[in-house]
Image (tube, rainbow, N blue to C red):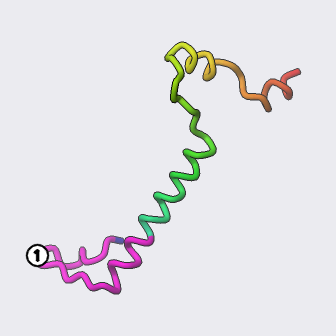
Amino acid sequence: MIAGTSNYGNPQVTLAAIVPAFNYFASWYVLAALAFRFVGIKTRGRTIEELDAALAKPAPGKAAAAQ
């Protein structure tokens, strides 16, 4: 899975193996950033009490389905 790990004493990593490895990890970072963008809440300028109240109320979709 990791480029160059077959030889523990003297890893022989080539450029052909490094580029796909960086692309693989970069894709996970992009996926995490997108997930945070759509799931994360904005905290700037809000107190702990305001954040607690925002997290305690039910989600809009669940409130309509429960009625």
In the rendered view, would you say 51 is above or below 8?
Answer: above
In the rendered view, would you say 7 is above or below 31?
Answer: below
Residue 6 position within the rendered picture, expressed as x and y whole percent measured from the top left:
23, 78
Residue 13 position within the rendered picture, expressed as x and y whole percent measured from the top left:
24, 81
Residue visible at 79% across and 32% down in the picture: 61
Q: In which quarter of the image is the N terminus?
A: bottom left
Name which quarter of the figure residue 23 lies in.
bottom left
Residue beneath disc 1: 9
Q: Is mark 1 on a helix, strand or loop?
A: loop
Name which quarter of the figure residue 19 lies in.
bottom left
The residue lying toward the viewer, choosing from 25 and 50, is 50
The residue lying toward the viewer, choosing from 6 and 42, is 42
Residue visible at 51% across and 59% down in the picture: 30
Please state the extent of the stretch shown in magenta in the rendering: 2-23
Q: What residue type is labelled 1?
A: Gly
Residue 4 position within the rendered picture, expressed as x and y whole percent measured from the top left:
25, 77
Residue 53 position within the rendered picture, expressed as x and y whole percent measured from the top left:
61, 16
- Tell which residue pokes out farthest to the right in this image: 67
Residue visible at 61% across and 23% down in the picture: 55
Q: In this view, does 17 lie to the left or right of 23?
A: left
